[in-house]
Image (cartoon, grey):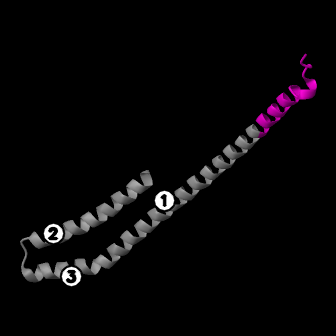
Amino acid sequence: MSTKRSGLFIGGLLVGSAIGAVTGLLVAPRAGKETRQILKKSADAMPALAEDLSTSVQLQADRLSETALRNWDETLVRLKEAIAAGLEATQRERQTLSEAEAEVSPASRPPIH
């Protein structure tokens, strides 16, 4: 869970930084030409920022996928063990019932007079 939270935090940090930078440029007391130049530089940096964000998201998705697969494998092992234990218990109970039936079979009952 902490890797998911840290990935979301990093993504939010990057997006928030970009939004904050653009907002700061728009409200800054600069001339229009200067602001447009700064906006152009920021816009030119956006593909790199998007690529970084995409890479970060992909890494987090890979980690989550690996964790999910590991959890799935562990669940399958526990399920197989539970099924094997259930089958073993069923066989023991069947054996116990067979032995009990053999003790109470008609041949071993005393005759009724």
Three-letter amino acid code at disc 3? Lys
The x and y percentages for residue 33 are 10, 83
Do the CB atoms of the residues marked 3 and 2 lie less than 8 Å apart? Answer: no
Mark 2 vs mark 1, foreground winner is 1
The x and y percentages for residue 100 are 83, 28
Compared with 40, 22 (above or below) is: above
Tell me which residue sits at (27%, 81%) in the image.
Answer: 44
The image quarter containing residue 52 is: bottom left
Which stretch is magenta?
Answer: 91-113
- The residue nearer to you, when weighing 97 against 22, is 97
**Pointer 2 residue:** 23
- Lateral position of residue 99 relative to residue 25, left or right: right
Label number found at residue 64: 1
- The residue nearer to you, when weighing 1 against 72, is 72
Location of the C terminus by quadrant is top right
Residue at mark 3 to residue at mark 1: CA–CA distance:
36 Å
**Pointer 3 residue:** 40
